Image: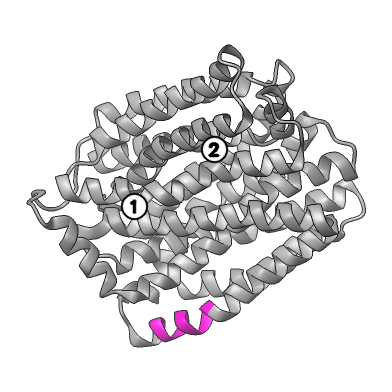
Amino acid sequence: MSAIRRDRRTLAAVVFAVLLAQVLLYPGVSDLVAAVGATTTLDASMWFLAAEFAAFVAFAGVWGAASDGVGRRAPLVVAGALGGAVGYVALAALPSALSLSFPAVLGLRVLQGATTIGAFSLAMTMLMDLDGGHGRNMGAAGIAIGLGTAIGAPLGGQLYGLGPLVPLYVAAGLLVCAGALALGLPDRAPGDGREGRVRRAIATLRARPALGVPYCFGFINRFTAGFFALVGTVYFREAFGLDAAATGVMLGLFFAPFALLQYPFGVLSDRVGRTAPIVAGSAVYGLAVVGVGLAPTVPTAGAGMVAVGVIGALMAPATMALVSDLSPADGRGTAMAGFNVFGSLGFLAGIVVGGTVADEFGFFAAFLAAGALETAVALVSIPAFLRLDADGDRAAFG
């Protein structure tokens, strides 16, 4: 096995472990927030999930700029993973030991998110640094993300059966494993980490507004994940009477095809370009989300979740590869951090917008709003994407 292929698999395993840890919490998040002191369900769940992604938004750029500045990524991946593990243990142990209020628990959640995003974002950036084709490398990242979420949802549902805090301890163990995997990885970050490199990287990105195109599509993709993590979870439990384990299976119906199809779709985007997968997927993405909300039975809702997963898998690796296509070699850490910021904003918006609309107007209104927002962002973004394609910024567009 070549060194590139071995490192690609190791980095994909790091990404997988981080996402698996994150998604373990979703199926029974209402039980979890009750165990750490919350007195509501939907509102408290919304803030618990939103706190982590607010931290992702705030700190992804910090980690990316730091890695570009020092010319090293692997030690920062280790630091972020171990810091995230400490954060998960603190969430499980400190609320009862110190009689923390729920706002204080949210503060711990922010700290956990601030460290975890370092491991995730920089592992993705290290994949960008590899040779072998951006679509192939981002396909590996995509399948790791998808598998982590696909396995995490049903596994988390089973773990909640053992106790509401068990997923937190398992998540901590997974991040320790992620840190251990990253210990032996070689750094391929370009440049020598000279002083002023961060400023040059950020200045280069400001001069490349075309990066805003994949950022917008990344926002759409992660919006759906955030929406289903909160609204979908509560909806399946209330509308169909599912328990945490069955709800995890329903979430897995979205994440499984999202995982399994990422790598082949990533390779496809290397062959046919980024335009067709992204534009074709975005055209029907919002409609598929609304279809889940209209489904009258568990089987039809499950079929809708599979459809959303397939469409998301078509878009995701091509979108991440487009970031690689457009970013300068010495600014990849900042470029991927920007992508993760927009992705985290999308996830955060999916939680907050979906949760707020569902609380005020009901679940169907929330599904309708989510689908309409995704369609609107796609319609606004597609013309810019097609102009980018026509300008021929990179040959990879096909």
Residue 88 at x, y = what percent? 50, 25
Q: What's drawn in magenta, residue-wise?
A: 381-389
**Rendered residue at 72%/43% (across/down):** 43
Disc assigned to residue 92: none
Please tell me whether mark 2 sits on a helix, a strand or a loop: helix
Q: Which residue is mark 1?
A: 61
Amino acid under label 1? Gly
**Rendered residue at 68%/25% (across/down):** 37
Verify whether residue 387 appears in magenta.
Answer: yes
Look at the image and tell me whether residue 252 can be seen. Answer: no
Say few, some or many: other residues with alpha carbon within 10 Å of mark 1 (under 14 / 14 to 19 / 20 or more). many
Report whether 215 appears left or right of 26.
left
Question: Which residue reaches farthest right?
Answer: 296
**Rendered residue at 28%/71% (across/down):** 206
Identify the image quadrant of the C terminus. Answer: bottom left
Q: For residue 292, what is the image quadrant?
A: bottom right
- Total labels drawn: 2
Residue 79 at x, y = what percent? 31, 30
Identify whether 328 is placed above or below 280: above
Look at the image and tell me whether residue 242 can be seen. Answer: yes
Of marks 2 and 1, which one's residue comes earlier in the chain?
Answer: 1
Disc assigned to residue 148: 2
Colour scheme of the picture: one colour
Say few, some or many: other residues with alpha carbon within 10 Å of mark 2 (under 14 / 14 to 19 / 20 or more). many
